[in-house]
Amino acid sequence: MAMFFDPFHEFDRMAEQLFDRQGPRVMPMDLYRDGDHYVLSADLPGIDPGSVDIDVDGQLLTIRAERTARSGEGVKWITRERPTGSYLRQLNLGQGIDTAAISATYDNGVLSVLIPISERAKPRKVEVQRSVAGAQDVTPELTA
């Protein structure tokens, strides 16, 4: 196995470690509307699904997850570039969301959250009724 040393790569890695903030990391995500619901897809590769926590408080959706470092007795790291720690994403859902029906799945490193639109926020047709009470009989009178 041939290995080479890239000084710029090493400098970038050291700078990232030095200036890396200690707070939660942001997870990349996509959000789109599909009919009567929104779909949020967040990349969380290597996350234990049991560490994923999704909370809805009012109109605030919070997603938390944790990636722990794998280690063992006598392990000597050659390189360690995959970030560990906590991940956090918060979204203001706004009005018109059925927060009680939000669901989520985790598959192949992608967290998918289905956010349904409430019935009252869905577009609907309003039927126009004919008014019978206000109509007058307009029959011409014949005079002889």
Image (cartoon, rainbow, N blue to C red):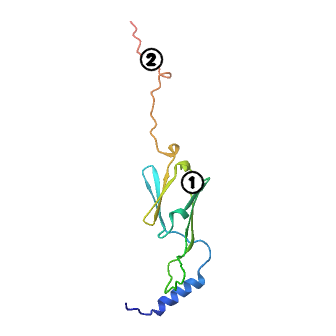
Q: Residue at x 55, y 64 (%)?
A: 51
**Which quadrant of the figure contains the C terminus?**
top left
Furthest toward the top, the residue is 144
Please determine whether, in this image, residue 127 is positioned above or below residue 62.
Answer: above
Residue toward you, 118 or 67: 67
Q: Which amino acid does the dot numbered 1 rest on? A: Gly
Residue placed under numbered mark 2 in the picture: 137
In this rendering, is residue 118 above or below 69?
Answer: above
Residue toward you, 133 or 32? 32
Q: Left or right: where does residue 107 sit relative to residue 118?
A: left
Q: Residue 29 location in percent, x, y?
A: 48, 65
Spot occupied by residue 134 in the image (x, y as percentages of width and height) = 50, 23
Instruction: Report the residue marked by disc 1.
Output: 94
In the picture, measured across the screen, residue 34 lies left or right of residue 85, that is left
> Which part of the image, by quadrant, shows the N terminus?
bottom left
Residue at figure coordinates x 44%, y 93% from the top left: 5
Residue 66, placed above or below residue 133: below
